[in-house]
Image: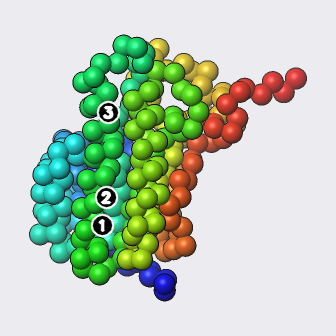
Amino acid sequence: MNRRDIEHDTVVVTGGTSGLGFSCAQRAMRDWPDLHAALLDMKEGRIEELEKEFGKDRVKFFKTDVTDYQSVQDSFKGTLDWRGGFSALIAAAGYATNKSSIETTPEEWRAMISCHLDGTFFANQAAGRFWIKSGRPGAIVNFSSVSHIFGWPRRVSYAAAKAGIDSITRTLAVEWAEFGIRVNAVVPGYINTPLLEEGLRSGRVDPSIREMHAMERFGEAEEIAAGVKFLLSNDASYITGEMLTIDGGFTPRRIPWNRD
């Protein structure tokens, strides 16, 4: 099986108009000046920022419910109509939870699983179908989480969904390698986002978690975006089925170190 480099022209980003998806799209477009971005999300969010920085011709929004199979198919078709193809997928759509396992309702469980597992698989499947049918190589980066690496109270549905994303990533990496398609995932720790800031203000996030990181700080969105861009690039041409943890040493440390 020969090496197949990718000339990136268009990236599809689920959850691309806010949060980490937005930062990933922005970083990729800055580093690859000819790259276009199809942003699949429920709301237009921060798309105007990308249009202002890169021009409206390089960015297009597709209203998408990633839990709905047909909605995902329609958005990928729209991307093909717009650009004729795409070379990369960043599956970043998702949300977190903080609720007792006992109190989690069936509706909340299903919503979490549907958003993360269904949404990730539907997008991966749509991308894989296009690349296999067209004979083009491609690169996918899914979004996992440190939440399932160890027992994390009040995260049961989120952790279960993210563990499933790891399985999707590994399985598709093996299944699609022969077609020149690489499938990897990033595993972020705590990242400075508006959601985290709100959690700290409201008391839902314990500020002492910062000191549980070996680097004793939260990460920045740009640091996750750099990892995603690397996995999409030809510098990662021999990497597939990998979960790249970017967490400032949160998972290896876990227990605060008393220097005294």
Question: How far apart, in angstroms, are the residues tagged by discs 3 and 1?
Answer: 24 Å
The residue lying at 36 percent from left, 13 percent from top is 103
Residue type indicated by callout 3: Met
Contact, mark 2 vs mark 1 (Cβ under 8 Å) = yes
Q: In this view, does 5 lie above or below 97?
A: below
Residue type indicated by callout 2: Asn
**Residue nearest the viewer, comparing 190 with 33:** 190
Counting residues from the start of the chain, the first of labels 3 and 1 encountered is 3
Query: What is the secondary structure assignment of the residue under circle 1?
Result: helix
Query: What is the secondary structure assignment of the residue under circle 2?
Result: helix
| Quarter residue 67 falls in | top left
| Quarter residue 209 falls in | top right
Q: Mark 2 points at which residue?
A: 124
Q: In this view, does 33 lie above or below 25?
A: below
Q: Is residue 258 left or right of residue 187?
A: right
Residue type indicated by callout 1: Gly
Contact, mark 2 vs mark 3 (Cβ under 8 Å) = no
Q: Name the residue under label 3.
A: 112
Q: Is residue 243 left or right of residue 105?
A: right
The label shown at residue 242 is none
Disc 1: CA contacts within 10 A as few (<14), some (14-19) or many (>=20): many
Query: What is the secondary structure assignment of the residue under circle 3?
Result: helix
Q: Is residue 142 above or below residue 201?
A: below
Say if residue 253 shows up in the picture: yes
The residue lying at 57 percent from left, 48 percent from top is 245
Question: How far apart, in angstroms, are the residues tagged by discs 2 and 3?
Answer: 18 Å
Q: Mark 1 points at which residue?
A: 128
Q: Where is residue 155 in the image (x, y as percent from the top left)?
A: 45, 26
